């Protein structure tokens, strides 16, 4: 008997034992341990065509996914492609289809396309998670009381508004921002403080290469103000050596809001802020600056 014939006979003899054990109701793991077969590819070949015993087919919530994964595997799909199609983990796919034959090797182009699709699925899932977290956090806020809006406005101004300095006296209220929601909150805060709209003055600050007219109309509409009452728009000179990121239709520059005759209001804002700092657990004993 030649060496090749001997190996074939050994395989056939081992397969006969594996099939007998399988039909006797043993699981893959039990057969592997009984025959001392540690190579999964060899075990797959020994058990090819032999269905698993019923007791190993425990009903699971993922049964439908498992069956679909096996169908796709039999169509020649790799783990990556099955993951893209079904959105389940590779570890689960491996458990479900490891007894099935491997597909033919894929080309570099195919591998790249599959990886790209897989990454797109991951990005979509992450984006969905982001939206759900933001939506849940938004629902936690609800309606603001007048006191909550008052305190929010003080903090908002101290973060974004013009402030007085010992070397540059600026006891006046001026607020600059590019975020429409920040502008709306600031205007709601001024209204809460009974600041009459007639005391407000607006003007736009924007890059000269942007759509200036569109931005001016946008801010006028947001504030409910006739643009003819706006001050002169400030244009930022274009530097051709810079690579600007604030471009496109969403770029509308900044809106500047001045409150006329606001020295007393500014002093009160500074005092309110110091009161917030002093009332916090970290700021007891904080005194007024200057």
Image: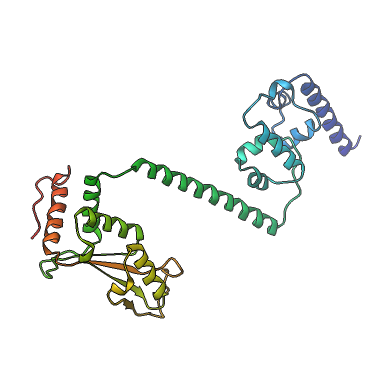
Indicate whether 116 appears above or below 281. below
Going by the image, does 231 lie left or right of 88? left
Q: Residue at x 38, y 80 (%)?
A: 239
Between 218 and 87, the one lying in front of the other is 218
Residue 159 lies in quadrant: bottom left
Quadrant the C terminus occupies: bottom left
Q: Can residue 192 be seen in this view?
A: yes
Q: Residue furthest right?
A: 1
Residue 171 picture quarter: bottom left
In the depicted view, which residue is nearer to us: 126 or 216? 216
- How many labels sit on residues? 0
Q: Quadrant of the N terminus?
A: top right
Q: Which residue is drawn at 17% across and 45% down?
A: 282
Above or below — where is 118 with respect to 59?
below
Residue 33: percent from the left, percent from the top? 69, 25
Q: In the figure, is residue 113 to the left or right of 249?
A: right
Query: At x 37% / y 65%, what residue is drawn?
Result: 221
Q: Residue at x 21, y 58 (%)?
A: 158
**Is residue 98 found left or right of 124 in the rendered image?**
right
In this picture the colour scheme is rainbow
Q: Can residue 98 be seen in this view?
A: no
Residue 198 at x, y = what percent?
22, 65
Depth order, front residue of 251/183:
183
Q: Quadrant of residue 220?
A: bottom left
Residue 270 at x, y percent in the picture = 14, 57
For residue 175, above or below residue 52: below
Foreground residue among 266 and 13 = 266
Residue 241 appears at what percent x and percent y? 41, 79
């Amino acid at each position: 008997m030649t060496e090749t014939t001997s190996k074939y006979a050994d395989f056939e003899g081992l397969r006969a034992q594996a099939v007998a054990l399988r039909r006797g109701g043993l699981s893959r793991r039990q057969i592997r341990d009984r025959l001392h077969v540690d190579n999964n590819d060899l075990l797959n070949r020994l058990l090819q065509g032999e269905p698993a015993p019923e007791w190993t087919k425990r009903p699971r919530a993922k049964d439908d996914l498992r069956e679909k994964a096996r169908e796709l595997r039999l169509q020649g799909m790799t783990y990556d492609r099955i993951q893209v199609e079904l959105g389940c983990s590779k570890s689960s796919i491996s458990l479900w289809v490891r007894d099935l034959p491997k597909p033919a090797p894929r080309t570099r182009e195919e591998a790249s396309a599959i990886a790209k699709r897989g990454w797109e699925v991951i990005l979509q899932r992450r984006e969905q998670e982001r939206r759900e977290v933001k939506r849940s956090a938004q629902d936690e806020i609800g309606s603001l009381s007048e006191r909550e809006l008052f305190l929010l406005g003080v903090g908002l101004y101290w973060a974004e508004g013009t402030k007085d300095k010992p070397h540059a006296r600026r006891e006046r209220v001026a607020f600059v921002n590019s975020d429409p929601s920040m502008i709306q909150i600031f205007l709601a805060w001024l209204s809460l403080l009974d600041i009459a709209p007639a005391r407000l003055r607006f003007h736009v600050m924007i890059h000269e290469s942007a759509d200036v007219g569109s931005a001016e109309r946008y801010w006028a509409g947001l504030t409910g103000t006739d643009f003819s009452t706006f001050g002169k728009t400030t244009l930022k000179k274009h530097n051709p050596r810079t690579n600007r990121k604030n471009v496109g239709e969403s770029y509308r520059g900044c809106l500047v809001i001045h409150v006329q005759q606001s020295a007393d209001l500014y002093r009160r804002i500074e005092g309110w802020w110091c009161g917030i700092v002093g009332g916090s657990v970290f700021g007891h004993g904080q005194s007024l600056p200057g």
